[in-house]
Amino acid sequence: MAEAFVKGLTSRKAIPAKRIIVMNRSQTDRLENLCTSYGVQAGTLDQVADARLVVLAVKPNSVGEVLQTIAPHLHGQPVLSFAAGVSIDWMSHVIGGVSPVIRTMPNIPVAVLEGATAVSFGEGTSWTDKELVRYLLGQLGEVVEIPESLMNSATAFSGSGPGFVCYFLEAMEDAAVRLGFEPEIARELLLQTVVGTARTLREWDLSPHELRRRVTSPGGTTHAGVTVMDEARMRDIVDKALGAAADRSAEMGNAYRAP
Ligand SMILES: NC(=O)c1ccc[n+]([C@@H]2O[C@H](COP(=O)([O-])OP(=O)(O)OC[C@H]3O[C@@H](n4cnc5c(N)ncnc54)[C@H](OP(=O)(O)O)[C@@H]3O)[C@@H](O)[C@H]2O)c1
């Protein structure tokens, strides 16, 4: 996630690469690689004190430890977290409320700068800090501000969404092979179908329902396939799957509730 962020900021020249200071825990070769690939600088903890924005791209179970370590260097500069399930209240509590906390839920396509990132701003985040964060995250794709109460739902559909889309694609690919296609050719057609459908929806400003209606002639091929999906109550299955993902996200976040 850290590399995706650095890549987004540097490739789009959002801020000068030299202003990005990176640090990690143990993999010095990985850090050196980031510095040589993107022109960013490796730094030390005390530099957190001079940072305009502090970004945490560590696993949820490392967030507490990292916040405790940097807390002495915080004096109001905003802290942005990529960690899934870790609440703003909990993070604020760990740092004694000295800095505003911003929580985000990106998804894997941020790695190719086509991500969908949900963001929630903690109490005390200034208007300029919000603008800065929207601008910086915007280099990774789309950014949507949501209330933190919706973070578990965002985790379910945009965080886990790429996994669900891939599940559907796997099934379509298997079916295409059964229909006689070579897997590589099936995949090529499927990928372009997904990319093309998404672009059509966006460029024509249509809802999925409307585009589906337009491509579904009564008695035609799409109609035949959709009828099978309807009979299998596909919508109920999707509804249950997203509900289960949101519940699991809430469950995982229970460990990070402020006392
Ligand atoms: N990957 C995704 O698709 C995705 C999607 C949504 C949200 N997220 C969130 O993004 C966060 C990062 O995920 P990731 O997949 O990028 O994790 P990752 O590949 O494991 O990277 C974590 C980084 O944190 C560093 N680190 C860990 N503990 C540290 C410490 N105490 N001090 C300094 N650096 C420390 C690690 O350094 P070393 O390698 O040197 O130990 C490593 O560079 C997670 O919280 C995850 O929930 C990820």
Image (cartoon, rainbow, N blue to C red):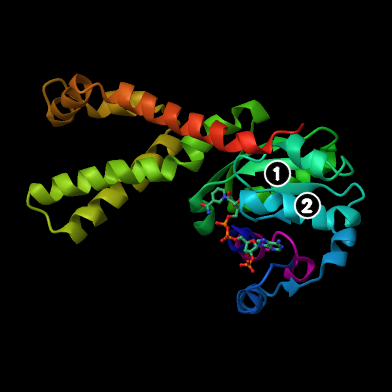
Q: What separation in Å lies between label 1 and label 2 (alpha carbons)?
A: 22 Å
- Could you tell me which quadrant the C terminus lies in? top right
Please state which amino acid type lies under the numbered disc 1: Arg
Label 2: which secondary element: helix
Q: Is residue 89 left or right of residue 110?
A: right
Q: Image quarter for residue 231? A: top left
Residue 15 highlighted magenta (yes or no):
yes
* Residue topped by disc 1: 134
- The one nearer the camera, 65 or 158, is 65
Q: Which residues are magenta?
A: 7-21
Residue at image coords 82%, 32%: 123
Residue at image coords 39%, 45%: 163
Judged by depth in the image, the label closer to the viewer, 1 or 2, is 2
Q: Image quarter for residue 228? A: top left
Find residue 75 and report its horizontal and vertical position in percent: 92, 50
Up-down: is 38 above or below 211? below
Please state which amino acid type lies under the numbered disc 2: Leu
- The one nearer the camera, 131 or 85, is 85
